[in-house]
Structures are given as structure tokens and as C-alpha cells.
Amino acid sequence: MPRREPSEGCEINMTPMIDVVFQLIIFFIVTIQMEKEFNPEIELEDSRHGPIVEGEQDPRTIEIEIDRRGWISIHNAQLSRARLREIMKARFDKYGSFPVLIRADRRTRHRDVRSVMDVCTETGIWRINFLAVYERRAEERTR
Amino acid sequence: MRRQGDTAKRRRKGEAAKLEMTPMIDVVFQLLIFFIVTLKQEDILSHLDVSRPAPDPNAVPEKQVEDLLNITVYEDGYVLNGRPVALPELDRHLTRLASFSKSISVIIRCTADSPHSLLVQLLDICAKAGLQNLAVFSL
């Protein structure tokens, strides 16, 4: 059995490992989302029986967030009730009736949810969807 | 000069030029670990559909339909047709009613101070029973 030269070192074939590692990195780069698309402070209530929100949604859908103090935001950008009304009106004039999702915190008082629903009905939208958590996969937050 | 001469000699011997792999692998692993740590799985969400009748009280059809179920959501619980009920009991009622007809109108009234979680829990058991005809009013 030939002895290895001490300076040569043990050589493993690196190529497949580097291939796999690059694949993983590209996967993570593509899937990463740096910015939150919604207000991360909002804690949703559980709902095990509601229909699941599918990945592919109607592109006209608007998602209105209401935090526990009753502040309204869309895509984590806070706005006033008057501004929300303008946005809804503009969207309604453009598309007609469109789906509305309400992401309200579980501790929100109904009067704040009501004010948003009233804006919807003023615009002419009668169907409203409330978002809830079907299955928790993110790390558990202390309640 | 001597070093250059050495490499030139080695090249000439047919040995492949070696790329220094160690720093690249270090960086790549750092990146990989960063991405694994920052990856966060999103919750699966469900949506609960309700209809919101007009805020105008004249447009509300009062006692128009026979099959009507009135549930009021207060700050601390539910009242079904004038009687306070707990959620499991309400669940049983709704499941039994839904076994007769899924098209029963359920009218949910919420007081201004009731938390949103109670409404969502109620809508959840309505979805479980399969009731489709839900209307939410605000008091």
C-alpha cells in the first residue's frame, strides 16, 4: 500500500458539494422576502374550518389591515379612513366590485372593524372576507 | 524568480492549475447559513366570508325570512335568540340546524366593544357547520 505524501493532504471531490450548496443558495436568494408585506404586529385569530387562502389570488384583491388600536393600513403603510375611502372608490371605479380581505387583530374592537366595513359598503362592496390563521407555521408568539 | 520557475515547471508537467477553494467555500457556507436562519415559514391563512348589509337601516329586511338565526356578539360572549350561550353549545346548535338546511340565514350582530376574536370564532364554527348565508351587523 503506497503511503501518501504528507504535503499532499486528503483530497475529497468538492464539485458535487459545491453544486448542491450553490443550488441551495440560489433557492434561498430567490425565496427570501426582506420586507414584510403586512403589519407584523397583527395577531390573527385561529380558524381551523374556513377555506384556505390559495396562493393565486384575484389580482384586484385589496387587503386592509386593522391593528389592535384600530389603525388602518395597507401593505404596512398606515392611512386614514378618508384616504382608504379614496383608494376604495378609485379601485371600484376602475374594476367594479372586487374582493376585500380584512386582516384584523384578534384584540381589535368591533367598532374599528365596523368603520372599515362601513367604508366598504359605502363604496358598494357587500362581500367581506376576514383573514384568520388556518395553520401556524411561523414560530409561536407569546400571547 | 525561483517560484515562477517552479510553477512553470509544474504546468509543463501536465498538472492542472489549482483554484484555491477554501475561501470560496467559507463564504458560500456563510451565505447558506444566513439564508437558512432568516428563512421564515408563513402561516397558512383561511378566509371567512360574510355579507355586510347596507348601513342604512331602511334597507335592512326585518323578519323577512322565516329561517333566521340571530346571534349577538357581546364583549364576553354570545347570545342566541335572546339566550346567552357558550361557544361549544352554539357549535352543537349550528351543526344540528345545518344538517336540515345549509341555506339558513344567520344574522350576527356585534356590539361596538366586542373583540374581533369572538366574531372570528363564531364565523369559524359557522364555516365548520357549512352555513353560507352569514350577515354581520353592527350595533
Image: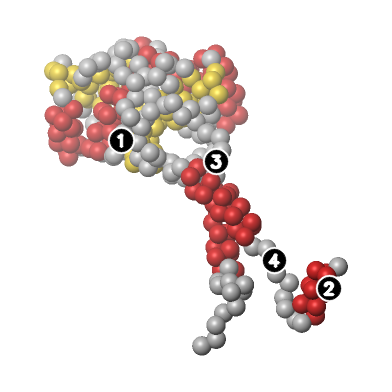
**Residue B80 visible in this rendered orientation of the protein:** yes
In the image, is B122 to the left or to the right of A114? left
Q: Amino acid at mark 4?
A: Leu
Using a 10 Å C-alpha cutoff, classify the residue at mark 2 as few (fewer than 14 neighbours), some (14 to 19) or many (20 or more). few
Q: Are marks 3 and 2 in contact (CB under 8 Å)?
A: no
Q: Are marks 3 and 1 in contact (CB under 8 Å)?
A: no
> Residue reaching furthest right?
B1
Q: Amino acid at mark 3?
A: Gln
Front tag of 1 and 4 = 4
User: To which residue does mark 4 refer?
Assistant: B19
Precedes in sequence: disc 2 or disc 4: 2
Distance Cα–Cα, label 3 vs label 2: 52 Å
SS category of the residue bearing label 4? loop
Front tag of 3 and 1 = 3
The chain identifier of the residue carrying mark 4 reads B
Q: Position of residue A7 (x, y in %)?
A: 62, 72
As drawn, A4 above or below A26: below
Residue shown at the point (42%, 26%) measured from the top left: A42
Residue shown at the point (51%, 22%) measured from the top left: A73
Using a 10 Å C-alpha cutoff, classify the residue at mark 3 as few (fewer than 14 neighbours), some (14 to 19) or many (20 or more). few
SS category of the residue bearing label 1? loop
Labels 1 and 4 positioned on one and the same chain:
no
As drawn, B20 above or below A49: below
Residue shown at the point (40%, 12%) measured from the top left: B56
Using a 10 Å C-alpha cutoff, classify the residue at mark 4 as few (fewer than 14 neighbours), some (14 to 19) or many (20 or more). few
Q: Position of residue A45 (x, y in %)?
A: 33, 30
User: To which residue does mark 1 refer?
Assistant: A47
Which quadrant holds the N terminus of chain B? bottom right
**Residue A131: which disc?**
none
Front tag of 1 and 2 = 2
Q: Amino acid at mark 1?
A: Ser
Labels 4 and 3 positioned on one and the same chain:
no
